[in-house]
Amino acid sequence: MKRNIIILLVAIVALNFSSCKKFLEFEPYGQPNQLANMNDEQAMQAVYSLFYWQYREGTLGRGFMWYENCSDNLITGRTQAEAQNIKNFLDNGSSGRDVRDNWPQLYQTINYANQLIKAVPTATKLSEKVKNNVMGHAYFFRAFAYLWLAPFYGDNGPNGGIPIVTENTTIDEIDVPRPASVLDNYNMIIEDFEKAAELLPYFDEIPVNEWGLMHKTAAWSLMARAALHASTWDPSYYAKVSEYADLVINSGKHALVSNYADVFKIENNWSPEYIMSATSTEIDGSKLPGVLFQNGGFGYYNTWGYYQPTLELYNAFEEGDTRRKATIVAPGDTIYFIGNEIIWAVNPSSVSSPSALTFGKYLDPFKAADAVGTTVNPNSDNGTTDLNVPLIRYADVLLMKAEALIWQGQNGDQYLNQVRVRAGLAPKTNATKADLKNERRCELALEYGSFRHLDLVRWGDAKAAYAQPLHGWKVNLGGNGIESLEVIEVWPARNFNPAIHHVFPIPAREIAKSVNLKQNLGY
């Protein structure tokens, strides 16, 4: 399925997704309007077009990860002035293409989904099964696009939500004002995911050659995530988080992979822990794996090193936590990269990471000597791999359930401890909010959608966290290898103003194209 999507996108995306001339105004796509004349196979090609956002640098390449780079888990690993402005909360909405592209690309997805929703009732040549599939995916991806934008740009005042455009919005009305509250967005998102879940099958009912298409538990999981974001502004939504997480847990369709590190191996792309991923191949997909490993890849492959871990993240893992070694490569660790054995920070001794740490979470496709062209894109400027990059997995659902219970004054041990025990840690008794916060940090580091920055903002912890400098190691080598590790500051303390920086600036060019779209205050 994922290769089908990628190949079809090469042929049809250029026709379907042209750049906008002003806010939310696009060239006619053609395909949704022709749905009435399509057969089942042609209609499914229209569904594949909804996945276009997954293959763009402005969303799952580098785009959204620049916002997560603001967290205390990461530092900018190489000189990039615009990225530094974002991390220091100095951006005014004019930063580079990776950030400014996320808004139009996801509103393109919303627009395309709206056209499909409007067109399906006229598609008399389609089987009922395919009609449901098309409509289910349209509702799913409309909700998903809003869910990826709303937490970064919307609030419950003074700025409000983000523009809501549906299948009933006419071209004359498309430049709509922002709703008064982002809760309007989250309520619509939950409603759309509910509709999608009614129409879509379970994952195990999808043929193998169509794996990557959406399914019921993906919709339910993202309903829980939407309610989790809504709880920032209205704690009563925690009850909904618990309810929606139960739909996934009680379905019996998912389980944790027994070994944490194995989750991020190609052979486990579709493991029981899988719920939704950015389906990727050595042809195209999410660039995140190629963006992470240290800049230059020691000359073996041109990895970019934009996001590097902090010592604060490294130290967040308890002793004995197997997730630390699976997540972070530290001085003295042995890894394999394009068939070469590397003792990190020793052989070769040159390390292009300010913290002397790098991420190993998505290194599996790079290990083999013949990886390039086999499991890794031969074009290192598009460093995709055969590894699916998770967007939500079962462990996240368990932790959302645990959080919902703990924040409602109930006991979340049953769900939190499933995640801890898998990591080789002793179970907690009467786990606290602090326990839950650290568990999310360690379990979900550098995973799309499960952003620590958004967690810190919604918990009200961002100001205090960002007032602290970030650290790494200076590696001192001797005749026998590493002689000592010296703690150094790698990023200064930052001034996070919760009244402004709880949201990011809407890309300036989107404001310029609109009459009604207003910039977030303070930018």
Image (cartoon, rainbow, N blue to C red):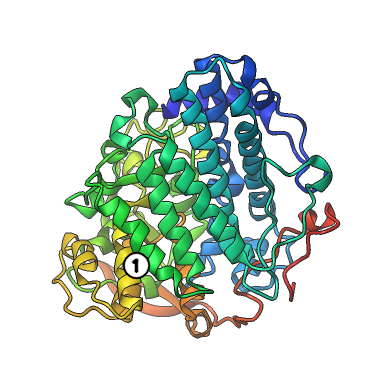
> Horizontal and vertical percent for residue 15?
69, 25
The quarter holding residue 280 reads top left
SS class of the residue under badge 1? helix
**Of the pair 143 and 63, the residue shown nearer to us:** 143
* 202 lies above or below 444: above
Asked if residue 345 shows in the view, the reply is no
Q: In the picture provided, is 118 more to the left or to the right than 296?
A: right
Asked if residue 266 shows in the view, the reply is yes
> Horizontal and vertical percent for residue 431?
23, 78
- The residue indicated by pointer 1 is 440
**Which kind of residue does numbered mark 1 sit on?**
Arg
**Of the pair 136 and 510, the residue shown nearer to us:** 136
Q: Please state, as top left, top right, bottom left or bottom right, where the C terminus lies in the image.
A: bottom right
Residue that appears at 42% across and 42% down: 197
> Horizontal and vertical percent for residue 271?
26, 41
The quarter holding residue 521 reads bottom right
> Horizontal and vertical percent for residue 139?
54, 41
Q: In the picture provided, is 487 more to the left or to the right than 480?
A: right
Q: Please state, as top left, top right, bottom left or bottom right, where the N terminus lies in the image.
A: top left
Q: In the picture provided, is 39 more to the left or to the right than 372?
A: right
The quarter holding residue 167 reads top right
Residue that appears at 45% across and 69% down: 237
How would you rate the neighbour count of disc 1 (Cα within 10 Å): few for under 14, some for 14-19, many for 20 or more? many
